Image: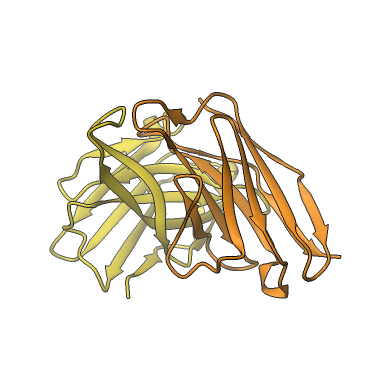
Chain colours: A yellow, B orange
Amino acid sequence: QLQLQESGPGLVKSPETLSLTCTVSGGSINSTSYYWGWLRQPPGKGLEWIGSIFRTGDTYYNPSLKSRVTMSVDTSKNQFSLRLSSVTAADTAVFYCARQIYYYDSRGPIPRALAYFESWGQGILVTVSS
Amino acid sequence: DIVMTQSPDSLAVSLGERATLNCKSSQTVLYSSNRKNYLAWYQQKPGQPPKLLIYWASTRASGVPDRFSGSGSGTDFTLTISSLQAEDVAVYYCQQYYSNPSNTFGQGTKLEIK
């Protein structure tokens, strides 16, 4: 049974850097069939994709956050991480890590592409204070 | 960016009745060559992470009860719960993954018991 667990500080001061780690158990982060994503949800609001990373370290980021986001992967520890710099109160949210399908379709717009998020961690609330 | 708009924002349905939730994309999420709609639905219960219900617009995820079904194509999609159960109270989100690698979610529909 795949499990993802977010960890990191629950309180970050503005304008410091938020750092979170996702530990994967019950499955290998080295799989070629998945990317590993970070998403966030401000209190009482909807979901926003932050970015996704492959086992090789290849990354894709949300263009609206790209200048502040860095993701990394440690396959030896079965973990991947998120850094979000220059945080403000607007970055207060529950942060989720998730496994994202990376599929092959020769008739698709590109042969290999990212798709939906099939497994999610429980989430971690990060509050940004001034 | 593809904007996803869900309607209604909230919905109250009696137990055992049908619930119909809508999702509209600002541009097509149907790719003509493979005839696939790049759309997923998620269920989020209070205090829990989202759970994948439907992908490719109409394929149920593993373990999802068959009272949940997805339909639609192009820009207009529907999630139907054929007979509402108490445990279905949640917020439901649609997500497009057509604009690869980016993806965007709708604002959610809150489903309650009438």
Q: Which residue sits at x=50%, y=54%?
A: B54
Residue B72 vs A36, above or below: the answer is above
Left or right for B104, reference B15: left
**How far across and how far down the image is residue A98, in percent?**
39, 57
**How far across and how far down the image is residue B105, in percent?**
55, 41
**How far across and how far down the image is residue A60, in percent?**
31, 36
Q: State the count of labels.
A: 0
Nearer to the camera, B75 or A47: B75
Answer yes or no: is residue A18 visible: no
Answer yes or no: is residue B2 visible: yes
Q: Name which quarter of the figure residue B46 lies in.
A: bottom right
Nearer to the camera, A84 or A114: A114
Q: Which residue sits at x=37%, y=42%?
A: A51
Q: Name which quarter of the figure residue B98 lies in.
A: top left
Residue B42 vs A91, above or below: the answer is below
**How far across and how far down the image is residue A38, in percent?**
40, 50
Left or right for A90, reference B32: right
Q: Which residue sits at x=36%, y=36%?
A: A61
Quadrant in the picture for the C terminus of chain B: bottom right
